[in-house]
Image: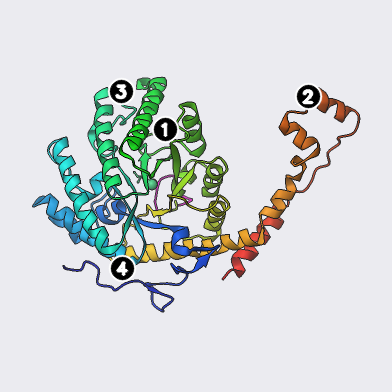
Amino acid sequence: MPEFFDVGDVGFGEDGDLSYRVYEPDRLVLGKRMEDQLRIAVCYWHSFNWPGSDVFGMGTFDRPWLEPTATDPMAAARQKMDAAFEFFSKLGVPFFCFHDVDIAPAGATFSDSARNLDDMVTYAEKKMAETGKRVLWGTANLFSHPRYAAGAATNPDPDVFAYAAAQVKHALEATHRLGGANYVLWGGREGYETLLNTDLRREAQQLARFLHLVAEHKHKIGFEGTLLIEPKPAEPTKHQYDYDCQSVHGFLERFDLVDEYRVNIEANHATLAGHSFHHEVAYSVSNGIFGSIDANRGDYQNGWDTDQFPNSVDELCLVLYEILRGGGFTTGGFNFDTKLRRQSLDRNDLFHGHVGGIDTLARALLVAAELVERETIAVPLNRRYAGWENGVGAGILSGAETLDSLEARVMAGEIDPRPVSGRQELLENRVNRVIWSSR
Ligand code: XLS
Ligand code: CA
Ligand code: CA
């Protein structure tokens, strides 16, 4: 079989650009192998389907597997899959993620498309058996085709809902066949452009109905992976319903779905929602809905989704700290939903982007583990809230205190709080010292 990448396997601890400096799959971090702590995945769409085009110009990338699509779409899909698995293997990470349309070409009818997907799943099974690579998550693309311009589940036309349901059923079953650890729903066009043509009440009910149908089917077919919703506040629609982790959480609670879904948090979507990535992960860990991560970053001067490779240990160590604090990943992991810059033309630039991003995550993991072990954050935090463990704090939480009883205590001078320093600068210094010294 011809090789698509003229480099060997990425090395470990060697000189040269194509070697990991920090990532060591077998190194134990808090009792678990680094590979099992990070559970890294490569995404199919940006890495193998995207030719480097943008709204102002055509593709710029050297991607031979994208060229012959006009002649035999299924042969082209197999060639693309060969390139993808060669890349996964040389990079040395355990997982990949895909949309239905990433791996299989659309046919003239739904049943043709479904057959193409089934055939490509068979081909993927073979490649997975040969290489040992696994599926972190699968998903259906419910946003590119014109039929979904006004949304999928939230479309005003029930026939579009039905078509989307058929597509998700098929993609969920494909993910199940491949032993996927999760299934993701990103509501790319579940939102609106203008309220002049949008019924918010109906669209919320449609979306909830859709999510119930997906959860019911998951149980029916015995899929044991986790269902994940991926929040994003806007883009492509002006306003998206799955705005951020907190609004998704509220929606799940409101429609009795909270036991069925968790969140797939994307770093760049967090910042587009006006939050830090740290905030979104901390919120979901604290509220029991944390699932998985799309690891990329935005550009702080741009207001759109640039999906760049992660490169800040300072930011990521706090994210990893929250994940470790919550017990680490269960079915989730770090998916590289990342795009090269359009000027990064060479095939091998895919390696540089991933190697740097993976080393950044590995370094952030080591820092986070030290923050856990040294209790750098936990000890002062617990001390700050210690008053709630007994006395009046415990009484308030247990319901023993009322407004009457509290007023009486304050009136009697028994309670007279003094302001206490939050010590933000001190805490920032302590975290920085761990970042600077960690090995
Ligand atoms: C787009 C999303 C998308 C989802 C999968 O912004 O990140 O790629 O992760 O449909
Ligand atoms: Ca994503
Ligand atoms: Ca994105």
Q: Is residue 395 visible?
A: yes
Position of 73 with respect to 397 (left or right) is: left
Which label is found at residue 156? 3
Q: Residue at x 81, y 38 (%)?
A: 391
The mark lying in front, picked from 3 and 2, is 2
Which label is found at residue 403? 2
**Splitting the image into four quadrants, where does ligand 1 fall?**
top left
Q: Is residue 422 visible?
A: no
In this view, the residue in front, 28 or 42, is: 28
Disc 1 crowd, CA 10 A, few/some/many (<14, 14-19, 20+): some
The mark lying in front, picked from 4 and 3, is 4
Mark 2–mark 1 Cα distance, whole angstroms, equals: 41 Å
Mark 1: which amino acid? His
Label 3 C-beta lies within 8 Å of the nearest ligand 1 atom: no
The mark lying in front, picked from 4 and 1, is 4
Mark 2: which amino acid? Leu
Counting residues from the start of the chain, the first of labels 2 and 1 encountered is: 1
Percent of width and height locating residue 404: 81, 22
Q: Secondary structure at mark 1?
A: strand
**Residue designated by label 4:** 90
The answer to whether 402 is drawn above or below residue 361 in the figure is above
Q: Residue at x 35, y 55 (%)?
A: 339
The mark lying in front, picked from 2 and 1, is 2
Q: Tell me the magenta residue range.
A: 299-307
In this view, the residue in front, 324 or 16, is: 324
Which label is found at residue 239? 1
